[in-house]
Amino acid sequence: MTTAVSHRQSAQPHMTVMVPAYNEEKNIAKTLQNIRQDLQQMSPNWDIVVVDDGSRDQTSLVVQSLVEECRVTLVKFSRNFGKENAISAGLTYAKGEIVICMDADGQHASDLMYTMLEKWREGYDMVYAVRQDREQESPFKLWGSRLFYRMMSSSTHVEIPRDAGDFRLMDRKVVDALCALPERNRFMKGIYAWVGYKSIGIPYTPLPRLHGESAYSKLKLIALAWTGITSFSVLPLRLASLTGATLAILAFAYGLLVVIDALFFHESVPGWPTVVASMMFLSGVQLLFIGVLGEYLARVYDEVKGRPPYIVAEVVTPAPSADSR
Ligand code: UDP
Ligand code: MG
């Protein structure tokens, strides 16, 4: 371990910054220039991977004009496959001994890379940035994320660090481990934590977006959280079994009561409303949990189909001379 650390102290590691971009024509040039300037200060060996996640604007053209200057490998998807898949692709194409993942919209200050590199030199294999500004967010995001982390931590063995996103540095061995995972439903926050390794969080405050709006609407955030929960925990299934068992016991007890009542105490059987109410309730609960089962089945179905998580339409790389400088 000490040798690995001392090797890192003196090393000039090859650094790759990986940027997923979706409709970022107004932001990407500035972001790449910032990254380039900081990388130049840190190591002679660096490059950038941009994954164009099926942008409908001129993102690719802007990136292509910077391929040589910023040593960019541009990976173009055939359509929009989502940020999680864009990151997976970026990790596959990243060559560096160190890989750093960063957003294209300028919210991730590239100078945090210095601190990340320092931590790597100290021996950490993964350094993730932890948001400090949660308190200022909308109540929906604030409470939503609290609920999400609570559900995750109570239902999985994988400890997902709070408020840590995709802005992070990873050592080569972490990247290799991530790339080796076969699953198609990629919930990155969970996967980063699942692979383990020596990790540390560093605080940061996201900057405002340069231009445009976040691609994540409320609905998309809920969908992402649901993917996270269903791909990393069986809590909803357990909840279904638990509710089912409780209701079955209650129903049995009530049934017994009705029979005893009818046999020994009353002649007629009134109680139509009770029958209807309990039937409605029970069928509602049943439908709900059949839905939950369906969700899991859908995920299994997705995995079994074996389709690739994304399709690369084109890869643009800098001329070899620029790369080996
Ligand atoms: N992004 C992507 N594919 C998508 C949506 C977003 O690659 O389908 C990229 C986007 O270009 C940006 C990053 O993911 O670099 C974060 O997206 P955004 O700023 O919209 O989300 P937020 O900052 O709200 O998390
Ligand atoms: Mg953003």
Image: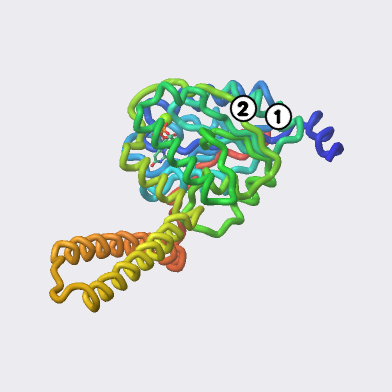
Q: Is residue 314 above or below residue 261?
A: above
Label 1 belongs to which residue? 119
Left or right placement of residue 121 versus residue 157 in this view: right
Report whether residue 60 is seen.
Answer: no
Q: Is residue 68 above or below residue 133?
A: below
Left or right placement of residue 27 versus residue 95 in this view: left
Decide: marks 2, 1 in contact (CB < 8 A)? yes
Camera-near label (2 vs 1) is 2
Give the number of marks: 2
Q: Residue furthest front?
A: 265
What residue is rendered at 62% in x and 35% in y?
Answer: 169
Q: Is residue 98 above or below residue 40?
A: below
Residue 152 drawn at (x, y percent): 50, 46
Disc 1 marks a residue whose amino acid type is Lys
What residue is rendered at 53% in x and 35% in y?
Answer: 162
Q: Quadrant of residue 247?
A: bottom left
SS at badge 1 = helix
Q: Residues within 10 Å of mark 1 (few under 14, many from 20)?
A: some
Q: Is residue 11 above or below residue 209?
A: below
What residue is rendered at 35% in x and 27% in y?
Answer: 138
Disc 2 marks a residue whose amino acid type is Ile
Left or right placement of residue 145 versus residue 167 in this view: left
Q: Which badge, 2 or 1, comes first in the chain's sequence?
A: 1
Residue 202 disc label: 2
User: How far apart are labels 2 and 1 at the CA level?
Assistant: 9 Å
